[in-house]
Image (cartoon, coloured by chain):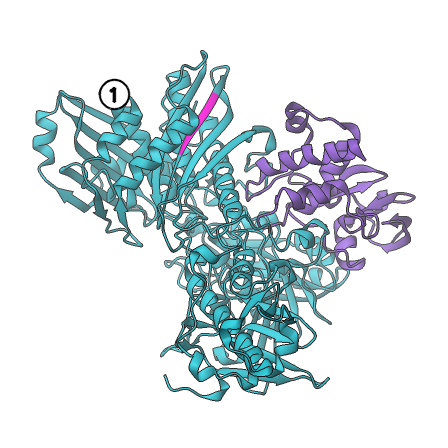
Chain colours: A cyan, B purple
């Protein structure tokens, strides 16, 4: 890349002060679109002469800690207090692809796959290191001293000889004189031994704002002259609007517009992107909500009529017997292994759909004009929010501005376009800004739930109690093949994984730890059964399994290379920390499980006490996570603790139900979730140190192995094997 | 048309309008106090918890018509000027918040709870707090409640 001056941009504000603005670089020598003096910039870092330092965060924060991690990484290189930076979300910095869709720029700008920290780790460090070197060079020129007399400390350049320091703000203008051509490609982030922030606990930089109720979430946004929309959406899993009384609705207090929203796509045989709906637009949310509740609407729900959770489960059972399955994976001679086995163990597992129940109901403000549109929303992906607005307005993406705010959880659901599209459609229709706020009922009824599946599991063990064959046959209503493709396949030589797809009208989508969240339970739960049937201690059985190979490259996304020496060390560490295998009182039990999710691996030991025959109390969870370099250990532990509690809740209660084609679980009265009273009072998390120089995934890694560790503990405590979720209905 | 007068965060306020409207929407849309959050609308999740006459209440389920003569405290009014409430301080110290959306309600619930339970046991917390957190920050919420109790006792 050729060098040019606009690598840095100096912005003259109306007050005549100068700001140093740096665009983000994905490598030290390659920068994103350069800035110009028009203010049309996509900055990563901005320094003003009045001492403000703006950190622009590339990926939305939905609780995974991206904002804090970004501030921490930048503060490390610049020797700043992270709390002294001002946080902004980075504007979209990608471009239109050949079809005109928003495509990622130097880095993805959506949160998913537990990738956020991994994605920003390099570019943010290199960009901040570049800024630091600019200040050092500027000071060297100003003071006419050699660079090696200078260092950065506490937000200032410090002269080691004279003991004089100069805060960055006084050097903003001087950085123009720095020889950035020498710096280009020659800036180096700090070595690990020199770090003072990365690898140490960093509290949430939004903690004060959150604890004092500052308006930082998407739903807190307001813009002048906006109207409020509440939308009655087709309650049937698939259907369309037939009739309603427009005049009666328009006569209600505050109601200004009644607008029909067509289902997208209009072909009912394809999964819905946007449900059919009727929007009530009023001066206030409450007026719109009250009118929407009173609306008498006739829907055509015939397409999904008769579909129910119970019927779907029955179809899965039938499909396992006689349905069409595709071989996902096969190796060795499974039939021979089964024939020669000392024991063959069989079991059937089933899990229902889970709702996301995002804490912040979906919302979006859109201000659509003839030739441009602007949105304010809580969305997991800046890029996809722009695509949603473009799809709804037919505007080119270059004419769309997306302001993505802090998200009150995302959990996979806030990646979808529907709530952004609705706001854009309505704003375009009435020619004024519109805020769409979903109710909790909307959020659950229109959820894209975690897929449901049933599994026929079969294992062969030899006379020594070693696993010799593994067979998984899956009937699922989603693209969830991991259980039929992942280890122990490959650790045992003889295996087969089969997967059959069952179509229906429930909308499925990603849910924290997609695929892994249930594959881990099925695999690690069944391995526990097999170990016990083979007369082995479950921990010894797992250690034997993971001793058969040192490495295994998986053919499931993101195609990680599993390092089994790490698995063994993680298991031994968590067992030691939990004093696994110690004698427990009657009615108490410990369960252990391990699983890789995306690029991270986590193991838990869960300790429970039975309460009567059908309930239990989780007293303690001990965990060990391999997330590579832990940039913020306090944040990593938060994600593990959260994953544990999310897993406990989903396993015990998660059950999105529908009857006659209509969801019947639509708020927290009918869709139960765990509260503090059932959460473990003791959680101990060990972060494994394997000497990694880079972070791996964290946010979704702890949840998947929690569920089998729990059901294995229930078995140890009660002798009852949970093979059907939710536990609350099946113990 | 309903007219009621009350106090919000110590200041006199009044409302004339639909008496069915829940307090939550008056706070968020009329009073500009966005810290109180909408979560479920049926009093189940507690994201909208405020204090009415010093007691925790779920503002999504309290109609404006019921508020005449009351004194309401929201998360914005919990601190004493610049001095944070002990529960807010404990929440920051224990780094409770992940996404943070439910935490204003959690803090308001905990602040009211500690008035009746100045030295809470785990059982007291289990039965006295039932606000939902979708990030699963319960472990740190429990620690923060205990820390706040200690600090309040020492104050």
> In the visual, does A537 lie left or right of A336?
right
Position of residue A14 in the picture relative to residue A613 (left or right): right
- Secondary structure character of the magenta stretch overall: strand
- Image location (x, y in percent) of residue A204: 60, 52
Magenta residues, start to end:
A604-608
Can residue A156 be found in the magenta stretch?
A: no
Q: Is the residue A540 above or below the residue A9 in the image?
A: above
The residue positioned 48% from the left and 69% from the top of the image is A129
Q: Residue furthest front?
A: A161
Q: Check disc 1 and report its element: helix, strand or loop.
A: loop
Front residue (pair B26, A114): A114
Q: Is residue A570 above or below residue A155?
A: above
In this rendering, is residue A617 above or below A274? Answer: above
Rendered position, A406 above or below A357: below
Residue shown at the point (45%, 53%) measured from the top left: A238
Residue under label 1, please give it.
Answer: A536
Q: What's the chain of the residue with tag 1?
A: A
* Residue A626 x %, y %: 38, 44
Q: Is residue A14 left or right of residue A64?
A: right
Q: Position of residue B137 (x, y in %)?
A: 57, 40
> Residue at 49% across / 56% down in the picture?
A195
Quick one: A381 or A364, which is closer to the camera?
A381
| Residue nearest the viewer, comparing A218 with A653 | A218
Q: Residues within 10 Å of mark 1 (few under 14, many from 20)?
A: some
């Amino acid at each position: 890349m050729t060098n040019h001056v606009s690598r840095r941009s100096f912005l003259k504000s109306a007050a005549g002060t100068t700001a140093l603005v740096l665009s983000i670089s994905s490598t030290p020598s390659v920068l994103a679109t350069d800035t110009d003096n028009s203010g049309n910039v996509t900055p990563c870092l901005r320094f003003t002469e009045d001492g403000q330092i703006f950190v622009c965060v590339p990926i939305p924060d939905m609780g995974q800690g991206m904002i804090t991690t970004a501030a921490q990484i930048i503060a490390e290189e610049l020797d700043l207090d992270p709390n002294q930076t001002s946080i902004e979300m980075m504007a979209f910095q990608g471009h239109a692809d050949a079809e005109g869709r928003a495509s990622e720029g130097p880095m993805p700008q959506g949160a998913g796959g537990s990738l956020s920290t991994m994605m920003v780790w390099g570019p943010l460090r290199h960009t901040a290191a570049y800024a630091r070197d600019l200040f050092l060079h500027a000071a060297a020129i100003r003071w006419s001293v050699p660079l090696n007399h200078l260092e950065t400390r506490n937000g200032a350049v410090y002269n080691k000889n004279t003991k004089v320091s100069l805060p960055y703000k006084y050097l903003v203008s001087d950085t123009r004189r720095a020889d950035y051509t020498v710096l280009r490609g020659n800036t180096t982030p700090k070595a690990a031994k020199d770090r003072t922030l990365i690898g140490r606990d960093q509290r949430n930089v939004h903690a004060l704002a959150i604890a004092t109720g500052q308006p930082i979430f998407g739903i807190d946004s307001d813009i002048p002259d906006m109207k409020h929309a509440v939308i009655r959406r087709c309650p049937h899993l698939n259907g369309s609007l037939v009739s309603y009384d427009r005049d009666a609705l328009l006569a209600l207090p505050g109601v200004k517009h009644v607008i029909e929203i067509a289902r997208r796509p209009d072909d009912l045989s394809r999964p819905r992107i946007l449900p059919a709906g009727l929007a009530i637009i009023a001066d206030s949310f409450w007026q719109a909500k009250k009118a929407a509740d009173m609306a008498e609407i006739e829907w055509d729900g015939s397409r999904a009529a008769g579909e129910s959770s119970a019927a779907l489960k029955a179809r899965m059972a039938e499909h396992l017997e006689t349905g069409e399955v595709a071989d996902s994976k096969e190796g060795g001679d499974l039939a021979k292994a089964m024939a020669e086995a000392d024991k063959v163990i069989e079991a059937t597992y089933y899990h229902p759909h889970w709702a996301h129940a995002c804490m912040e109901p979906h919302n979006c403000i859109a201000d659509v004009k003839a030739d441009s549109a602007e949105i304010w929303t809580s969305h997991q992906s800046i890029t996809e929010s722009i695509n949603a607005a473009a799809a709804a307005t037919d505007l080119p993406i270059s004419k769309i501005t997306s302001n993505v705010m802090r998200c009150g959880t995302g959990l996979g659901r806030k990646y979808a376009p529907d709530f952004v599209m609705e706001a854009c459609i309505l704003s375009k229709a009435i020619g004024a800004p519109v805020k769409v706020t979903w109710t909790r009922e909307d959020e659950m009824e229109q959820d894209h739930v975690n897929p449901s599946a049933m599994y026929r599991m079969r294992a062969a063990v030899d006379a020594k109690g070693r696993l010799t064959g593994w067979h998984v046959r899956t009937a699922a209503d989603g693209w969830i093949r991991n259980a039929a493709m992942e280890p122990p396949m490959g650790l045992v030589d003889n295996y087969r994984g089969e997967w059959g797809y069952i179509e229906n009208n429930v909308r499925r989508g990603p849910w924290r730890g997609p695929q892994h969240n249930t594959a881990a339970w099925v695999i690690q739960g069944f391995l526990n059964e097999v170990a016990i049937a083979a007369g082995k201690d479950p921990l010894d059985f797992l250690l034997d399994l993971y001793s058969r190979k040192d490495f295994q490259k998986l053919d499931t996304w993101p195609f990680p290379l599993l390092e089994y020496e790490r698995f063994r060390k993680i298991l031994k560490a968590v067992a030691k920390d939990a004093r696994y295998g110690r004698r427990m009182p009657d009615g108490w039990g410990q369960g252990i499980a391990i699983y890789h999710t995306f690029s991270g691996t986590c193991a838990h030991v869960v300790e429970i006490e039975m309460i009567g025959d059908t309930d239990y109390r989780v007293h303690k969870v001990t965990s060990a996570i391999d997330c590579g370099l832990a940039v913020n250990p306090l944040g990593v532990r938060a994600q593990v603790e959260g994953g544990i509690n999310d897993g406990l809740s989903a396993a015990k209660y998660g059950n999105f139900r529908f009857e006659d084609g209509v969801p019947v679980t639509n708020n927290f009265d009918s869709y139960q979730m765990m509260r503090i009273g059932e959460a473990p009072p003791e959680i101990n998390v060990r972060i494994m140190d394997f000497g990694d120089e880079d972070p791996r995934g964290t946010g979704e890694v702890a949840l998947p192995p929690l569920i089998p560790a729990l059901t294995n503990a229930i078995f140890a405590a009660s002798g009852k094997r949970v093979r059907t979720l939710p536990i609350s209905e099946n113990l | 048309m309903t007219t009621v007068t009350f106090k919000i965060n110590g200041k006199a306020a009044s409302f004339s309008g639909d008496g069915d409207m829940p307090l939550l929407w008056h706070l968020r849309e009329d009073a500009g106090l966005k810290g109180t959050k909408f979560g479920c609308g049926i009093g189940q999740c507690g994201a909208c918890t405020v204090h009415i006459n010093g007691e925790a209440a779920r503002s999504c389920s309290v109609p404006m018509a019921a508020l005449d003569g009351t004194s309401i405290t929201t998360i914005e009014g919990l601190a004493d000027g610049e001095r944070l409430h002990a529960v807010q301080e404990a929440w920051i110290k224990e780094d409770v918040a992940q996404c943070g959306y439910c935490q204003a309600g959690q803090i308001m619930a905990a602040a009211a709870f500690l008035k009746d339970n100045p030295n809470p046991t785990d059982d007291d917390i289990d039965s006295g707090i039932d606000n939902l957190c979708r990030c699963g920050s319960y472990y740190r919420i429990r620690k923060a409640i205990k820390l706040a109790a200690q600090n309040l006792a020492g104050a």
